[in-house]
Amino acid sequence: MRLRGRKGILESIESQPELVVLDGTAYKGRWHEFFGNDQPIYVELGMGKGQFISTMSFRNPNINYIGVDMYDELIRRGAEKARNIWAERGVDSPPNLALLRANIEGIENIFDKGELERVYLNFSDPWPKAKHARRRLTHPRFVRKYMEALNERGEIHFKTDSQSLFEFSLNSFADMELLTRNIALNLHKDGLRDDLVPTEYEMKFYERGQNIHRIEVLIGEEPIAAWRQAKRDAASAETAEAANPDSDEEDEQGAPEA
C-alpha cells in the first residue's frame, strides 16, 4: 500500500505527542501512564483512516483506545478525524485515544503481557496467495502474540469482506482450540447494525451489497467462563422445557375461570 500524502506529514504527527505515539516500545508495560488512568485498553491493528477507533473512543469514554498503523499519512488522517469527532464535545484532543505508528510484526515489543483487553482486526489485508499465508493477521503466529498481550478479560473481534480470509481464520482459531461466538457470515443482512461501529471500508462494502463476516474469539478466562455458564443455563432451560412441555400451552390459556 502506497500513500501520497501532503508535505509536512511527519512534522504534523510529530507535533501531536498528546495523541500520536511514534515509538510504542517506550510505553511497553506503561500504556496506562500515557492515558493517566487504569481504564481497560482496546487496540485496533490496522486502523486505516481512523473512523472506527475514533468513533469508539468518542462513544466509550471509560475505555482507552489505541489505533495502530505503519503509515505516517494514515496516522495524520486519523488524528484529524479524531479531533473532528471529539470537537462535537468541545474537546480538542481525545483523552482516551492514542494513534500509534508501528509495524504489527513487532507488537510483542510494544505491549506487555496482559496489558490489553481487546484486539480489533478490521478488514485486514487478506494476502490471498498461499505463499503469503503467514502474513495474514489471523495466522497462528500473530494470534499467539495477541494472546500474550491480552488479559483475563481478553477477546479478539475480527471483521472482513474476504470469504477466503474468513475461512482461513476460522480454521486458524479452530486449530488453536480457541472458543468463538457470534459468528456472522452476513453481518448486515437485516440492515446496517447500529450497535456496531462500521469502518470506512465496511460502509463501502455494505452499500455495494457485499457480505461482511464477523467473529469474536474468547481468550481470557472471564469471557470463557461466561460463555460456558451461558451454555449450561441454556441446556438447563431446554431440559426444564422438555420435562414440562405443556407449560407454554397453559400460560397461553391462562387460569381457568371461577
Image (tube, rainbow, N blue to C red):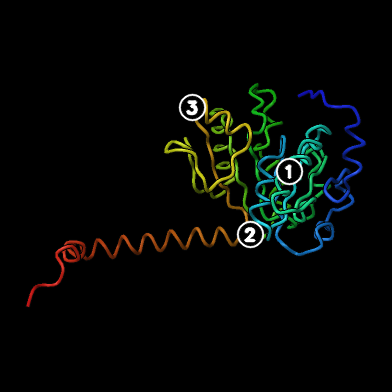
Where disc 2 sits, the SS reads strand
Q: Nearer the viewer, mark 1 or mark 3?
A: 1
Q: Quadrant of residue 162?
A: top right
Single out the residue that lies furthest toward the left: 258
In the picture, the disc for residue 209 is 3
Q: Which residue is mark 1?
A: 84
Q: Is residue 243 left or right of residue 49?
A: left
Q: Is residue 123 left or right of residue 69?
A: left
Q: Is residue 176 above or below residue 246?
A: above
Q: Nearer the viewer, residue 75 or 112?
A: 75
Quadrant location of the N terminus in the rendered image: top right
Q: Callout 3, which amino acid?
A: Gly
Where disc 1 sits, the SS reads helix
Residue at 58% x, 29% y is: 204
Specify few, some or many for label 1: CA neighbours under 10 Å numbering under 14, 14-19, or 20 or more.
some
Q: Nearer the viewer, residue 169 or 10?
A: 10
Cα distance, mark 3 to mark 2? 34 Å
Q: Position of residue 206 (x, y in %)?
A: 52, 31
Cβ atoms at labels 3 and 2 below 8 Å apart: no
Cα distance, mark 1 to mark 3? 29 Å
Which comes before the other along the chain, label 3 or label 2?
2
Q: Position of residue 92 (x, y in %)?
A: 79, 50
Q: Nearer the viewer, residue 5 or 160?
A: 5
Which comes before the other along the chain, label 1 or label 3?
1
Cβ atoms at labels 1 and 2 below 8 Å apart: no
Where disc 3 sits, the SS reads loop
Q: Callout 2, which amino acid?
A: Arg
Q: Callout 1, which amino acid?
A: Asn
Q: Which residue is mark 2?
A: 153
Which comes before the other along the chain, label 1 or label 2?
1
Residue at 63% x, 59% y is: 153
